[in-house]
Image: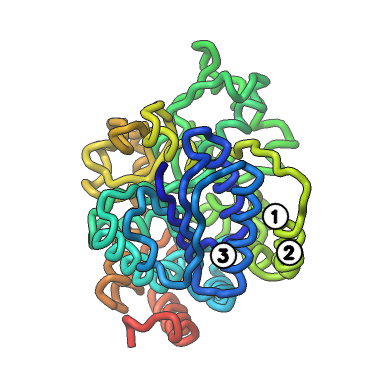
Amino acid sequence: MPKITFIGAGSLGFFKTLMIDCLSFEALRNSDWALVDIDPKRLDYARRIGERIMRDAGSTGKLVATLDRREVLKGSDFVIMAILVGGYEPIAFDIDIPMKYGVDQCIGDSHGPGGVFRALRTIPVKVGIARDIADLCPNAWVLNYTNPMSMLCRAMDIETGINLVGLCHSVQGTTGMLADWAGVPRDEIDYWVAGINHQAWVLRIRHNGEDLYPKIREAARKPEHWNSLTASCEMLEHLGYFVTEGSGHNSEYNAWFRKTPESVAKYCPGGSWNGGSGFIKQLYGSDREGWEADQERFASDTSPIVFRRSHEYGSNIINGIQTHVPFRFNGNVANKGLITNFPQDVMVEVPCFADKNGVKPCHVGALPPQLAALNSMNINVIELAVQAALKGDRDAAFHACCYDPLTMAVLDLRQIRSMVDEMFEAEKPWLPQFA
């Protein structure tokens, strides 16, 4: 049986979903689990929740929980990472300081000023974990669920070259929604999606050989869809392809939808999927006030757990590698000639297969030029932010924000410099490499 180490098990909702998913597979039911977190209270909840899940699954595997990851990494076959560096406080700075300057973000965790600064404080921690993995379990497959996905995976790949794939749920979520729009069963579609994380493109989507794009374009013009996913539908109308991730996220990654209060009101009228201003503060603030009571209820509950698999990829990948039953998914990997009009080695999100040989990405070729152009703008930001975090280079962080499409649509260079300086000052406690 494999040993699965979960770093960031205090991300309790995510941890219990993935553990239930894994234990729903017969081949993984008796896996050993090691849970790691830096918060003793959250770690204890994770231990209690994990023990309940394993008991209900009839698992004979072992479970340990520790604050010290090096204690448990040795012998790990799989390492899942889902961490949040600094908690809520710096996230408020990520959103509020740019907003003061007119840079209106919805989530701000992947690109833009918020994504850059989240990367600056997270990359040193992630690289430290990756070095421990390279030292203690170099053959393990590492599944990263932490954002900013592309920046973190790129930094870990540069520094260690561990077996790494970044995972998101936007591809399966978006393609499932498009199947609903086209009026066909979700489990009967086939699709081909590629690009970068949170900005990949549905290049092809079919049902029994039928191209579903004509039906999807027709559905996107209906008021109920246009009004709930405005930016994404606009991009489909003008760029020709549907983009993954929610409309709110995608409205942040270009210069078209959030540069004035009027454009925000028109294209991003509210909520996470449709671009509400600073929506992430609700997710990490008031929406999480009852987390402890929720976890206590789950840990203490005696009713049987239903082992119904979620749409997260992680458990299927682990099962595929463990059993040699192939599983296809979209993953974030280094570009080794996979997308030919992107730079080599940058992080791309492409179709992959998991089996006994590990994770093998698929060759895509060249993206349509209008799609590659927008991706390339964000790849430039990613590359600058990674270098800033790895080298403690403040100018590179400033330049990353300079070339962010939304920021450059709103601010001039002196204003960007002022905003970045203010963010550095506010987030100084979480940025030791810039001291």
Looking at the picture, which amino acid does disc 3 mark?
Answer: Gly
- Binning the other alpha carbons within 10 Å of mark 3 as few (below 14), some (14 to 19) or many (20 upward) gives many
Which x, y percent locates residue 93? 55, 77
Asked if residue 334 is positioned above or below residue 402 in the image, the reply reads: above
In the picture of the structure, the residue carrying the numbered disc 1 is 271
Type of amino acid under label 2:
Glu
Q: Earlier in the sequence, mark 2 or mark 1?
A: 1
Q: Are marks 3 and 2 in contact (CB under 8 Å)?
A: no
Relative vertical location of residue 218 with respect to residue 415 in this rendering, above or below: above
Question: Residue 118: where, in percent of width, then height?
Answer: 45, 69
Q: Residue at x 27, y 64 (%)?
A: 131
- Would residue 9 appear left or right of 226 to someone viewing this image? left
Q: CA distance from mark 2 to mark 1?
A: 28 Å
Mark whose residue sits in front, 2 or 1: 2
Residue matched to label 3? 10
Mark 3 or mark 2, earlier in chain: 3
Label 3 vs 1, first from the N-terminus: 3
Q: Which residue is mark 2?
A: 296
Label 2 SS: helix
